[in-house]
Image (cartoon, rainbow, N blue to C red):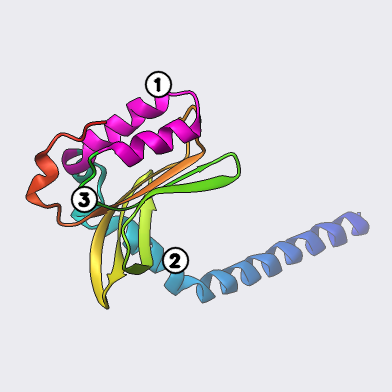
Amino acid sequence: MKGCFKGCAAIALMMIFLSVVAGYFLWQAKPKIIQAVRTVFDMPEHGKREYIDQHYGEFINAFIEIEANVDSVEEIVESVETMDVSDQILFFKINAEGKEWTPVNQSGWSGVSSTVINGYGAGHLTIDGESQPISIYKQDRGWSHIEEVIIYFVHPPSVSTDQKFVE
């Protein structure tokens, strides 16, 4: 009976010790946890799905249709390169087969900070020393030929966003 009591007491003490240690590490990570939660709830309007679908949905849908109707990644890249993307897209990257392609990469930008939740998000690029807000579409599932696509759209969109994106 004494052995069982000692074993249970040791287990209880170990659980208390582990709870204190876990609590300490959570307390140390508190600023990062708070920032992550704030980021989720404070997503800028131009990073929300509804906004991106409204302003850039035609292009995204055209890309989805291209991806579903071609036989290779090279065909997808070629189709994107021939699409009229005007100045609405700063960056477009496709990852597949262990490689990456960038059919659109406007020059002159660097440094990206971003938040993406469920494939939609917002961030900033540094362009000529100025911070440029962007809308982001990032999808890594549901594709036939590719593993991931990342698109940085200009924010705010120019008047030409209402144009039809065609192949």
- Tell me the magenta residue range: 54-83
Is 25 covered by the magenta stretch?
no
Is 79 covered by the magenta stretch?
yes
Q: Which residue is mark 1?
A: 69
Left/right of residue 97 with respect to residue 63 in the rendered view: right
For the residues marked 3 and 1, what is the alpha-carbon distance in whole angstroms? 24 Å
The residue type indicated by label 3 comes to Gln
- Mark 1: secondary structure: helix
The residue type indicated by label 1 comes to Asn
What residue do we see at 32% from left, 63% from top?
A: 107
Q: Which residue is mark 3?
A: 88
Which dot marks residue 33?
2
What residue do we see at 31% from left, 68% from top?
A: 108
Q: Nearer the viewer, mark 2 or mark 3?
A: 3
Left/right of residue 41 with respect to residue 9 in the rendered view: left
What residue do we see at 15% from left, 52% from top?
A: 157
Q: Quadrant of residue 122?
A: bottom left
2 above or below 109? above
Q: Tag 3 or tag 2, which sits nearer the N-term?
A: 2
Tell me whether circle 3 and circle 1 mark residues in contact (CB < 8 Å). no
